[in-house]
Amino acid sequence: MLAEDPFAQDAELGAHVLAHRVGTCACYARKLRSRRIEIVAGWGRGLRRTNMRQPRKTPSFKALRAASARASGAARAASRKRDTRCEIVLRRELWRLGMWYRIAWAGLVGRPDVVFGRARVAVFCDGDFWHGRGLAARERKLKAGHNATYWLAKIRTNVARDMRQTSELEQDGWLVLRFWETDIKRDPAAISTQIAAIVRARVGSSR
């Protein structure tokens, strides 16, 4: 009678153990999937990572309908995060005056559109609509328009965010300058000259 191969026995036992562990982990993962918890299975150990949804901080446009395709396209075109027309015009004038600056500095709260690091001056080019210029009059118009609830919440949220970001920057020692887009487009030379004078004065006083 031939003796049983001990290596074959070990291999068979290892296969049974592996199948049991994989099956257990798969069953465990199926039970927890409904709780939105992902399981990364290892050799008898599970690494668990929560995947819970965080509450939304800004108004949602889900289930809303655009007033028209033209209105939807205009809204998307007007909501660019950077390199808007007024920003480009202002930067061109600042460069003409010999001013050096950074654009949309991610290291600062709100990512200011133009930043003078040495002078600690942060410049924002605020769109009239998105940032709530003439808020009271704008709210009256929005209430009579399409998807009024969403737009009122959106603009009010933007205004509150701007105030919060300005306060945080000022507490950190920055001078915050905010200009409306229509004012920049109307006279970019005057606004850039104003900014340049402030920046140079702050740099001179810090020497």
Image (tube, helix red, strand yellow):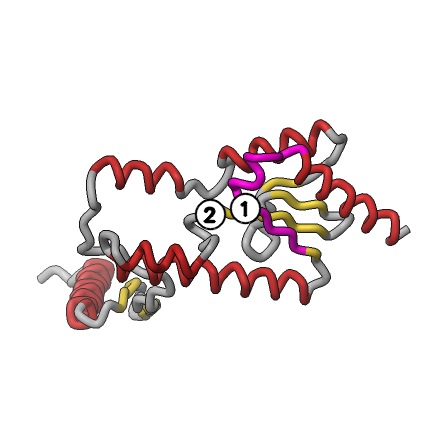
Q: Is residue 22 left or right of residue 123?
A: left
Q: Is residue 201 left or right of residue 80?
A: right
Residue 122 lies within the magenta run: no
> Is residue 168 visible in this depiction of the protein?
yes
Q: Are marks 2 and 1 in contact (CB under 8 Å)?
A: yes
Local packing at callout 1 (Cα closer than 10 Å; few below 14, some 14-19, many 20+) is some
Alpha carbons under labels 2 and 1: distance apart: 6 Å
Task: Name the residue tied to disc 1.
Answer: 180
Residue displayed at 70% across by 58% down: 174
Toward which corner of the image does residue 27 lie, by quadrant?
A: bottom left
Q: How many numbered circles are shown?
A: 2
Rendered position, 74 above or below 9: above
> Is residue 17 visible in this depiction of the protein?
no
On residue 128, the disc is: 2
Q: Nearer the viewer, residue 190 or 52?
A: 190
Residue 178 lies within the magenta run: yes
